[in-house]
Amino acid sequence: DPARAVSGLGTQWETLRLAVKPYPSCRYSHAAIDAILALKREHGIEADEVEEVEIGLPQTGWNIIGGPDDKTRVESVVDGQFSMPFCAAVALREGSFVWDDYARHLGDARTRELTKRVRSVVDPRAEAEFPANMSGSARIRTGRGLFESFVTVPRGEPGNFLEDREFREKFDGLCAPYLDAEQVNQLADTLLSLEKCNSISAVMALSEGERVH
């Protein structure tokens, strides 16, 4: 439909309706990770003091990342991406979750032990929000007490978008293994002013690189 293709051209930006994943894992895990990180910051929770973690997910999310398989058995990156216990354990230990965490935590004994203290359940609140929102919750039990948070709209959605700084940090982190710092900066600047670019060849040239470390 040509009319639909050009409708709103120059005034309506479909990219503003897209979500960006702040964490390198299944989107269903993100609201719970948001909740864990918020609780960790607010209450100073250390991974070693965690006795139990209960993650609440919508039913579809639970089916994919929470169970019924043993999601504590994580042997590969893909296993980790679709394991709520692994994602929760990394978030608790690091206070963040980035791509390089897979290399640090796959096979790590302390992380593996922490995953065994994480269980996932279907949260009726998250189920009620689905599919409009991929909500989630976290309940963290420590010797100091029980801490809980429910996140309706995970970070990265248009209604809860990343700050420019966070967006750039993710971009830099993903480019760093392949491009040097100067090239990363040039590529970012070019992409952020793409409307001024007369040839996509310049963008592609800046995207070429080799693994630098």
Image (cartoon, grey):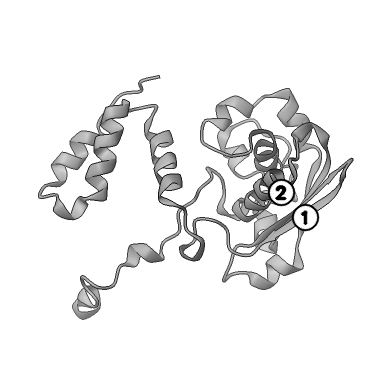
Q: Is residue 106 left or right of residue 138?
A: left
Residue at left offset 21%, top offset 50%: 193
Which of the 4 image quadrants contains residue 44?
Answer: top right
Q: Do the residues labelled 1 and 2 touch (CB within 8 Å)?
A: yes
Q: What element carries label 1?
A: strand
Residue position for label 1: 148
Compare residues 48 and 175 and report the one nearer the observer.
48
Q: x and y percent of residue 115 in the render?
A: 75, 37
Q: Residues within 10 Å of mark 1 (few under 14, many from 20)?
A: some
**What amino acid is labelled 2 in the image?**
Leu
SS for callout 2:
helix
Q: Quadrant of the C terminus?
A: top left
Q: How crowded is mark 2: few (under 14 residues within 10 Å), some or many (20 or more)?
A: many
The x and y percentages for residue 166 are 46, 46
**Disc 2 designates what residue?**
39
* Left/right of residue 64 with respect to residue 144 in the rendered view: left
**Residue furthest top in the image:** 213
- Above-or-below relation of 104 to 168: above
Q: Where is residue 82 in the image (x, y as percent from the top left)?
A: 62, 45
Real-space Cα distance between discs 1 and 2? 7 Å
Quadrant position of the N terminus in the picture: bottom left
Q: Which residue is drawn at 26% across and 49% down?
A: 192
Q: Which mark is on residue 210?
A: none
In the picture as drawn, the residue positioned furthest to the left comes out as 198
Q: The residue under label 1 is which amino acid type?
A: Glu
**Image coordinates for residue 205, horizontal then vertical, percent:** 18, 35
- Which of the 4 image quadrants contains residue 168? top left
Q: Which residue is drawn at 70% across and 44% down?
A: 40
Q: Which of marks 1 and 2 is nearer the N terminus?
A: 2
The residue at 57%/71% (across/down) is 132
